[in-house]
Image (spheres, rainbow, N blue to C red):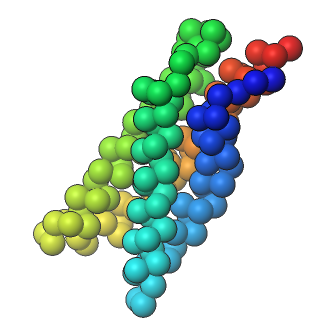
């Protein structure tokens, strides 16, 4: 099995990401806001880099057309796009004083879709690189 470095990094992020994002999201108590902001910002940067790595820098696997045809991939893609929109919403709601009260209420849903996107992304790795080597 040979996987490009971007795929290995994406797999590592998919395994480490959900617990880290959940931990970061729960650090928003009084006095822990700087830790929350730092952890969430690092998570966002990693997420965006993984998306860029997969979308623009990595040559498509020969099995990619077969993966794209699967309904599970479409589910993953829906979670991934929803996550990026959710991240944008969270950043905007935090930066806009009028929307700040919504930040706390919508955050758990963004974290949930983010975690589901990462977990369903593991299947993509397995399909492209592990099942393809058999």
| Numbered disc total | 0
Viewer-proximal residue among 89 and 134: 134
Task: Tell whether 64 sits left or right of 1.
Answer: left
Q: Residue at x 67, y 46 (%)?
A: 12
Say which quarter of the image contains residue 82: top left
Q: Relative to 39, does residue 65 appear above or below in the rendering?
A: above
Q: Residue at x 59, y 62 (%)?
A: 20
Q: Residue furthest right?
A: 134
Say which quarter of the image contains residue 107: bottom left
Q: Relative to 67, does residue 47 appear above or below in the rendering?
A: below
Q: Residue at x 56, y 24 (%)?
A: 73
Say which quarter of the image contains residue 130: top right
Residue 6 rendering spot, x and y as whole percentages: 59, 35
Q: Residue at x 55, y 16 (%)?
A: 60
Residue 72 rendering spot, x and y as whole percentages: 60, 24
Residue 96 rendering spot, x and y as whole percentages: 16, 66
Residue 44 appears in view: yes
Q: Relative to 39, does residue 128 appear above or below in the rendering?
A: above
Viewer-proximal residue among 110 and 20: 20
Viewer-proximal residue among 110 and 23: 23
Task: Tell whether 42 sits left or right of 102.
Answer: right
Task: Tell whether 77 sits left or right of 37.
Answer: right
Q: Please identify the quadrant where the C terminus is shown.
A: top right
Q: Please identify the quadrant where the N terminus is shown.
A: top right
Residue 87 rendering spot, x and y as whole percentages: 36, 52
Residue 79 appears in view: no
């Amino acid at each position: 099995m040979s996987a490009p470095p971007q795929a290995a990094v994406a797999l590592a992020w998919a395994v480490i990401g959900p617990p880290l994002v959940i931990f970061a999201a729960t650090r928003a108590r009084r006095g822990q806001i700087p830790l929350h902001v730092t952890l969430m910002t690092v998570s966002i940067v990693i997420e965006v880099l993984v998306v860029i790595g997969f979308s623009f820098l990595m040559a498509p696997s020969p099995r990619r057309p077969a993966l794209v045809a699967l309904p599970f991939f479409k589910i993953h893609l829906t979670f991934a796009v929803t996550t990026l929109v959710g991240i944008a919403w969270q950043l905007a709601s935090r930066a806009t004083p009028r929307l700040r009260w919504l930040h706390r209420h919508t955050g758990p849903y963004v974290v949930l879709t983010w975690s589901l996107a990462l977990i369903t992304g593991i299947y993509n790795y397995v399909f492209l690189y592990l099942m393809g080597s058999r």
